[in-house]
Image: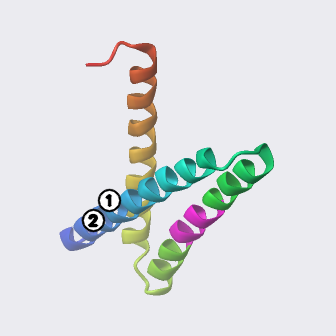
Amino acid sequence: MIPYYKILAGLLIGLAVGALNFYLMRTFVRLSLKNKGRALGAFIIMLSYGLRYLLIGLVAFWLVKMNEQVIALIMLAVLAAMTLLLAALQQKRKSGTGG
């Protein structure tokens, strides 16, 4: 049986990493839009993906090294759920059927 504190820790870490990931994504998109020229904008977006995935990978790797595989798995599940939820909300907003 999985202790409840591991589930809660996974949820909290997942939400924190997800919030930081979303903030970094917004920041890099705004930065790329401010810079004129396709090459620089594309480079900034690629750098954004690299840094954000590196952050997620480092946190997951650290948790696994600390022998907290359950927390790492729950964190990744929370990130996946947040990604799907944000994509669905964005799609709903684009189609004009939202709220």
Residue 88 lies in quadrant = top left
Residue in the image at 39% along x and 13% along y: 96
- Label 1 sits on residue: 15
The answer to if 52 sits in the magenta stretch is yes
45, above or below 20, in the image: above
* Front residue (pair 19, 72): 19
Residue in the image at 27% along x and 65% along y: 12
The answer to if 81 sits in the magenta stretch is no
Q: Amino acid at mark 1?
A: Leu
Whole-angstrom CA distance, mark 2 to mark 1, is 5 Å
Task: Tell me where the magenta segment starts and ends, as one range.
Answer: 50-57
- Residue 48, image x and y in percent? 61, 58
* Front residue (pair 3, 16): 16
Please tell me how crowded label 1 is: few (under 14), some (14-19), or many (20+) other residues with Cα within 10 Å: some
Residue in the image at 38% along x and 37% along y: 85
Residue 14 lies in quadrant = bottom left
Which label belongs to residue 51? none
- Label 2 sits on residue: 12
**Residue 6 appears left or right of 20:** left
* Front residue (pair 81, 67): 81
Query: What secondary structure is found at the residue carrying circle 2?
Result: helix
Query: What secondary structure is found at the residue carrying circle 1?
Result: helix
* Front residue (pair 13, 92): 92
Q: In what quadrant of the picture does the C terminus appear?
A: top left
Residue furthest left as drawn: 4
Give yes or no for contact between labels 2 and 1 (Cβ–Cβ under 8 Å). yes
Q: How is the image coloured?
A: rainbow
Q: Amino acid at mark 2?
A: Leu
